[in-house]
Amino acid sequence: MAKECQICKKRGTMVWRLKKLRGKYNPTIKKRKYPNLQWVKIPSDVKKPAYKKFAGKRILACAKCIKTLAKKK
């Protein structure tokens, strides 16, 4: 459950940063990047099918899913 969006299953990825060292690139810096997860309460009257199973619950969702949830048609 931790560090994973419960809607789209987005999780952390490894990224490599090229560090320039004496005129040559030395790809030694590895870092794990995590998605922007936030606690959000899903309303019980949600109409989108992807959010139906989370209706009325408090879940960890990434910022992209929260933005999609706020859209009105």
Image (cartoon, grey):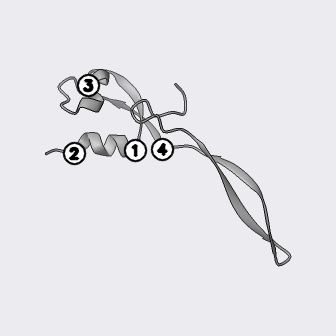
Query: SS of the residue at dot 3?
Result: helix
The structure residue drawn at horizontal position 24% and vertical position 42%, both measured from the top left corner, is 70
For disc 1, the neighbor class at 10 Å (few under 14, some 14 to 19, many from 20) is some
How far, Cα to Cα, is label 4 from label 3?
A: 22 Å
Query: SS of the residue at dot 2?
Result: loop
How far, Cα to Cα, is label 1 from label 4?
A: 6 Å
Q: Which mark is residue 36?
A: 4
Which residue in the structure is indicated by mark 3? 52
Residue 67 percent across, percent down from the top left: 31, 45
The structure residue drawn at horizontal position 22% and vertical position 45%, both measured from the top left corner, is 71
Which residue in the structure is indicated by mark 1? 63
The structure residue drawn at horizontal position 52% and vertical position 25%, both measured from the top left corner, is 1
Which residue in the structure is indicated by mark 2? 71
For disc 2, the neighbor class at 10 Å (few under 14, some 14 to 19, many from 20) is few
> Quadrant of the rendered structure where residue 66 is?
top left
Q: Amino acid at mark 4?
A: Asn
Q: Earlier in the sequence, mark 1 or mark 4?
A: 4
